[in-house]
Image (cartoon, rainbow, N blue to C red):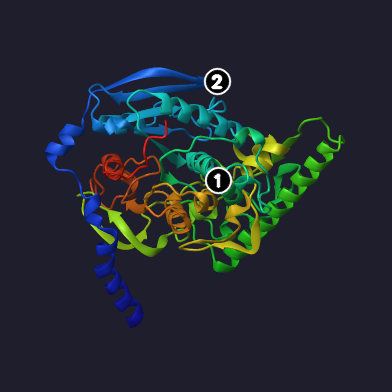
Amino acid sequence: MPKRVRSLLRVLALALPLIWAPSTWAAPTPMAAAAQRETVRNSFVHLANGVPGVLYEPAQPGPKAQTAVFIMHSSADYLTFSGCTELARRGYRVLCANNSTSKSGVSNDGALDQVLLEVKAAVTWLRRAPGVEHVVLLGHSGGGTVMSAYQFIAEGGVTACRTAEKIWKCPDSLAGLPAADGLMMIDSNWGLAAMTLFSIDPAVRDEARGTTLDPALDMYEPANGFRETGSTYSPIFAKAFLQAEGRRNTALISHAEAMLASIDAGKGPYRDDAPFVVPGAILLGSNNKLFSQDVGLMAHTRKAWPLIHADGSVTVQIVPTVRVAENVRSQSPSLIRGALKTTVRNYLNSYAIRTGADFGYDAQSVRGVEWTSTYASPPGNVQGVSVPLLVLGMTGHWEFLAAETIYDLARSRDKSIAFIEGATHLYTTCSKCEPHPGAFGDTLATTYDAIDRWLAKPKRFASNQK
């Protein structure tokens, strides 16, 4: 490492603790931790047709219960997500809900606009709930798209989601969304649209079938660097793969836009919409993501940030991932496990994002993505959000690196970021990542303790908006 770089890192190590005050992330004392273990009660909440919710709250509500946290994913069942009980045990009211697309946990056909209306129903319900003074949204994984899009439109109105660069212009039904008082992006990914982009298999030669693949662009070919125990792709292959991925993404958007124009002109196969199936592009899991196999990609942050360790100590440093390689076979030939199955309108609404000619990613960042070309994009949405923002990344999974992108682009004046060492995407301890058993401690507790300390800061949120 060059001497000038080492000197700069030493300066950062000394200065950043003063800027980021990592002591605010310190572990609670044993007495404080015991006090957090509240008895939790829950009750069913009917938010709308097909939108069930469960309200979790302390049996003996204290001052923290004036803050209500709302949790919903973009498609999965979150009625029993860990945050529901963990935050209620720490004294908060928590409303966990499923949207009307959350029926299977593997659905990829739910329109974002409809889900945002269902978030509106939840925020409206919480605003009217006795004892609730502040409402804070929690977006995990694909829920980051939902929550950031909601707050972005709630603050900016429908004009914000109808700007010239937006692929999909939002409907009038999204006017007048009641804004939340805070936003938490807790291992949110880069968004439904970007995760679809990252999942597009450039080896697919024919949009009508997923069984014809170009071996020169197949990330599962040993000749290209694939190994079941973990791959190392050459810079030449990675560049070719990602450039082809970007080109296919651009072609898919153009095709969908042409199909929509035909539908609107009365020349489509149906009057209202049409099926849109994309072979080798399902965004679930590690499907076709080059970085899922090569841990040298998306490997560490660009800047130094607070990293919370098992003992509660915090270091301010370049944050590395501790994850291991995932996914050992191509799902592109499978309709069920490999194809994005949606409609033309929903593809443009929920899954499309524009890229430039320089699209790609390396060990520390993504480049060439037009984040504001869709509101299915947390990095784009936070540029229009002003409420207090908390961003946490889990280093035991590759989605952790999205935290830095989201934080860097966020407009909020009150914004905080930290990373949890050794936590999986679900905040649990990544035991297979540990150098020795117990090295990362109880990362679930570490994560929710950090959220608790952020939520509990006095006067963090705006006055009651009821």
Q: Is residue 199 left or right of residue 130?
A: right
Q: Secondary structure at mark 1?
A: helix
Q: Secondary structure at mark 2?
A: loop
Task: Point out the frontmost of discs 2 and 1.
Answer: 1
Q: Is residue 190 visible?
A: no
When asked about the image quadrant of residue 262, the answer is top right
Residue 7, label in figure: none
Across and down, in percent, residue 164 comes to: 69, 53
Dot 2: few (<14), some (14–19), or many (≥20) neighbours within 10 Å?
some
Query: Relative to the observer, which residue lies in front, 199 or 16?
Result: 16
Query: Relative to the observer, which residue lies in front, 291 or 43?
Result: 43
Dot 1: few (<14), some (14–19), or many (≥20) neighbours within 10 Å?
some
| Residue that badge 2 annotates | 50
Across and down, in percent, residue 257 comes to: 76, 46
Q: Residue at x 26, y 40 (%)?
A: 445
Amino acid residing under circle 1: Gly
Whole-Å distance between the Cαs marked 2 and 1? 28 Å
Q: Is residue 422 left or right of residue 292?
A: left
Query: Relative to the observer, which residue lies in front, 232 or 380?
Result: 380
Amino acid residing under circle 2: Gly
| Residue that badge 1 annotates | 156
Across and down, in percent, residue 419 comes to: 34, 52
Q: Is residue 299 visible?
A: yes
Dividing the image into 4 quarters, which one contains the N terminus?
bottom left
Query: Quick check: 41 above or below 11?
Result: above
Number of labels in the image equals 2
